[in-house]
Image: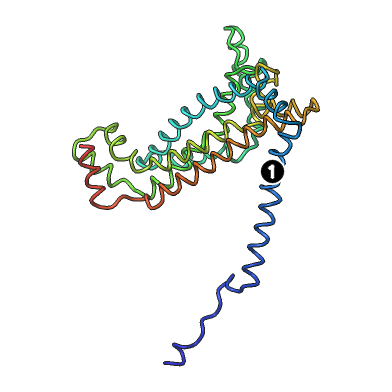
Amino acid sequence: MSAIATRRKPPRIGDGPVFRRSLIGVVLVLVAILILAPLIIIGVEAFSKGWQVYRDTIAHPDTRHAIMLTVLTALVAVPVNTAFGIAAAWAITKFDFWGRRFLLVVIEIPFSISPIVAGVAYLFVYGLQGIFGPVLDAYGIKILFAIPGIILASMFVTAPFVARELIPLMQAQGRDLEEAATSLGASGWRTFFAVTLPNVKWALLYGVVLCNARVMGEFGAVSVVSGNIRGQTNTLPLHIELLYHDYQAAGAFASASILALIAVFTIIAKVALERQGAGRVRPRAPEAANLAEKAS
């Protein structure tokens, strides 16, 4: 018995110091080459011709218009996709209905197809030769090569972000609290705001942050539907491409630095939200009872 107790356990995969150090070393090298090096290059090249060129590039009317159009797109697309994500997650996790699995599959579609394909699809839906194109043209409504097309394409690409963050969490939490609140006489809206929303707020904010970052950095679908009209339908990623093609490398990197800063702030917000939301998968029993009482 003592011999069995004192027998050494077989080493687990990764316990060896050589393997562990080699794996960590490979990861660090790849991070340095694939992530850190491009970010450093953006910062170096953005100021390669001095602060004056950097400031002039950012202050240029085309750059300012690209920034404003990018912000406008985010201000419209992110709230709409947030509302869609909440509604989709609520319906999928709290109700049983025919087509529930199909809805899950449909929500994942923007992740599984190329943004370029999505942009081309919009051409065949809203273009002059598309399904709704002739009708829209007859009424003087312009979707493609205009701001509405940019917003629609951005909404399509980023539609799953909020829903994907909420659905697993709401499935893990179950329906007990909502059913308890409903049995106490709470309405659907009151149950959502008093019970469901407090339990998913960190995941919701996390999804919103990721959605916003993707909207501002979207290139593929927007490049197809915008027409790349300088100073009119160019978002910031498209403006960077135009500057690069015009052999204005410093200006392109200066504009790219704005997107890089957005990415850095997104990561900081992501880490902060992950810390706040850690351990919040399911509320404790006393807290759950309080939430149900508030809803009633």
Q: Is residue 12 above or below residue 62?
A: below
In this view, the residue in front, 275 or 94, is 275
Numbered label tally: 1
Q: Could you say where residue 251 lies in the image, as x and y percent from the top left?
A: 73, 28
Instruction: Give the residue displayed 54% in from the left and 22% down from the top.
Output: 72
Mark 1 is surrounded, within 10 Å at the Cα level, by few (under 14), some (14 to 19) or many (20 or more) other residues, namely: few
Residue 25's image quarter? bottom right
Q: Could you say where residue 228 lies in the image, as x and y percent from the top left?
A: 70, 21
Colour pattern: rainbow
Q: Could you say where residue 50 lies in the image, as x and y percent from the top left?
A: 73, 31
Quick check: 276 left or right of 195? right
Q: Is residue 291 above or below residue 4?
A: above
Residue position marked by numbered label 1 in the rendering: 40
Instruction: Give the residue displayed 76% in from the left and 29% down from the top.
Output: 244
Identity, as a three-letter code, of the amino acid under mark 1: Ile
Quick check: 200 left or right of 74? left
In this view, the residue in front, 21 or 104, is 21
